[in-house]
């Protein structure tokens, strides 16, 4: 017993150097190292860890500058450095800015989706994306559809010349070069002189409102029978009378328009135009239009919701009073319709991405008036004719071999006759041929489930 007390006393005396728990009931004990020794061991641990990290860093160091290392396996990329226009990260050898050196879920070891990477640097384009009119190519595709990511012989790293690139989608514009009166920028393929290729607040992605864009080159010089009317037209939308591309009429009038306007017979609709006097029409509002275009009650809805905002003349909601790009003198319906039906535009865009493009021209080009005629139709959804005939106008061949349709063929889901849109959706299709469901099984069992 005395020996045990002496042992514990000795440990107590050495308390500044050692601490110990007295043996527990099991006979085991825990000895705690002195504070000084613990501090030394901690410092030693940090030093050892630093040496290990330093050693690993040296082991992980690349064998050469990143771009030189990449060029060893990708020699063609090095050759592209000699192109006229080189992307600045690529020129500076910052391959890692866009690519992961080891693994990625994206082709080409791209760090993120293409648009996300591009917009992370190109803030100006990112801000433009908040605008109302976004280029369809950008909404449906990626930046690399139009731009090379490394270098190009074309300005802005374009994959083709500006004109050829635009025409790869807007092929119908080529025919306008055969017109006798051609707008100089259009003839020279300078699309960017008037349009923003990414987005804009204006329709057709104009750089600014039409009268502002036009005034950068053309001062207003409008006349009627020698009487200047520039004071009246200077605030008008130039596109309401003139084409931005080409026409058959001198002064780029049209290309389609009222015969009286194109032949400069203004007094067919207007009272005699006199200098310094307000320009007036022979009749007010819809009365002027219906004086030539006879109103047919069976083809026109009075007090329709689409005309509420134009109580003085509902016609001008959809039709231009002088000239238009369209034969029926209709305005740009994609802007007009999607001002209210924005959700439809979003659904179509999502459908195009899911189906990797669609072939229906009116839907693809957002030509709403090809199928719908607001105020001029008594059909549901303002279809041009009944739900079968509207589709058969374009799909005559498919109509001959289609699933049974019409009266006597009842859709068990709603008790209504089966029509084209019973299986197809023009705005929100989920499967090929713009079907609402996969035709191999899922579509059929919607009705044939017994």
Image: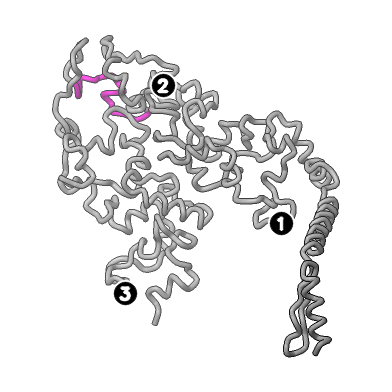
SS at badge 1? loop
Residue 412's mark?
Answer: 3
Which type of secondary structure does the marked residue at label 2 adopt? helix
Q: Which mark is residue 103?
A: 1
Residue 98 in the image: state x and y as whole percent.
Answer: 67, 45
- The residue identified by callout 2 is 214
Q: Quadrant of the C terminus?
A: bottom left
Cα–Cα span, label 1 and label 3: 51 Å
Separation of residues labelled 2 and 1 (CA atoms): 50 Å
- Residue at figure coordinates x 17%, y 38% from the top left: 311
Which quadrant of the view contains residue 329?
top left
Q: Which mark is residue 231?
A: none
Q: Nearer the viewer, residue 151 or 359?
A: 151
Q: Which residue appears at 71% of the width and 45% of the height?
A: 96
How many numbered marks appear? Answer: 3
Q: Residues within 10 Å of mark 3 (few under 14, many from 20)?
A: few
* Label 2 Cα crowd, 10 Å radius (few <14 / some 14-19 / many 20+): some
Circle nearer the N terminus (3, 2): 2
N-terminal of the pair, mark 1 or mark 3, is 1
Pair 3/2: label in front: 2
Question: Does residue 259 appear left or right of residue 196 in this picture?
Answer: left
Range of magenta residues: 255-270
The one of 344 and 2 positioned closer to us in this rendering: 2
Q: Residue furthest front?
A: 2
The answer to whether residue 350 is magenta is no
From the viewer's side, name the closer residue of 134 and 171.
134
The answer to which of marks 2 and 1 sits earlier in the sequence is 1
Relative height, residue 263 to residue 397 (above, below): above
């Amino acid at each position: 017993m005395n020996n045990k007390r002496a042992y514990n006393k000795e440990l107590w005396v050495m308390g500044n150097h050692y601490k110990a728990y007295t043996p527990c009931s099991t006979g085991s004990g825990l000895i705690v190292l002195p504070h000084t020794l613990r501090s030394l061991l901690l410092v030693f641990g940090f030093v050892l860890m630093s040496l290990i990290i330093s050693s690993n860093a040296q082991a992980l160091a690349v064998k050469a500058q990143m771009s030189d290392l990449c060029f060893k396996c990708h020699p063609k990329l090095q050759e592209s450095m000699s192109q006229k226009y080189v992307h600045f990260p690529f020129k500076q050898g910052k391959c890692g800015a866009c690519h992961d050196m080891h693994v990625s879920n994206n082709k080409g070891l791209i760090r993120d989706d293409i648009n996300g990477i591009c917009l992370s640097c190109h803030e100006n384009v990112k801000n433009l994306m908040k605008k109302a009119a976004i280029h369809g190519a950008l909404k449906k595709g990626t930046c690399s559809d139009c731009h090379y990511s490394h270098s190009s012989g074309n300005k802005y790293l374009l994959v083709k010349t500006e004109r050829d690139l635009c025409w790869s989608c807007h092929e119908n514009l080529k025919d306008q070069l055969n017109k006798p009166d051609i707008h100089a920028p259009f003839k020279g393929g300078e699309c960017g002189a008037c349009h923003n290729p990414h987005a804009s607040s204006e329709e057709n992605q104009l750089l600014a409102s039409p009268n502002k864009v036009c005034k950068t080159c053309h001062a207003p010089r409008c006349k009627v029978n020698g009487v200047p009317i520039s004071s009246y037209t200077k605030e008008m939308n130039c596109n309401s009378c003139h084409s931005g591309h080409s026409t058959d009429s001198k002064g780029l009038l049209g290309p389609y328009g009222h015969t009286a306007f194109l032949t400069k017979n203004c007094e067919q609709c207007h009272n005699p135009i006199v200098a310094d006097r307000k320009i007036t029409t022979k009749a007010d509002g819809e009365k002027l239009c219906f004086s030539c275009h006879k109103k047919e009650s069976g083809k026109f809805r009075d007090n329709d919701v689409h005309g509420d905002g134009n109580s003085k003349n509902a016609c001008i909601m959809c039709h231009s009073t002088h000239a238009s790009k369209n034969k029926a003198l209709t305005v740009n319906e994609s802007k007009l319709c999607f001002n209210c039906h924005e959700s439809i535009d979003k659904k179509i865009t999502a459908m195009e991405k899911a189906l990797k493009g669609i072939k229906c021209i009116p839907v693809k080009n957002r030509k709403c008036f090809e199928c719908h005629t607001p105020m001029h139709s008594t059909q549901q959804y303002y279809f041009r004719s009944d739900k079968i005939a509207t589709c058969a106008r374009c799909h005559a061949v498919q109509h001959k071999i289609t699933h049974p349709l019409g009266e006597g063929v009842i859709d068990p889901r709603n008790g209504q006759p089966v029509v084209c849109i019973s299986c197809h959706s023009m705005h929100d299709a989920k499967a090929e041929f713009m079907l609402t469901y996969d035709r191999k099984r899922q579509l059929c069992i919607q009705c044939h489930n017994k």
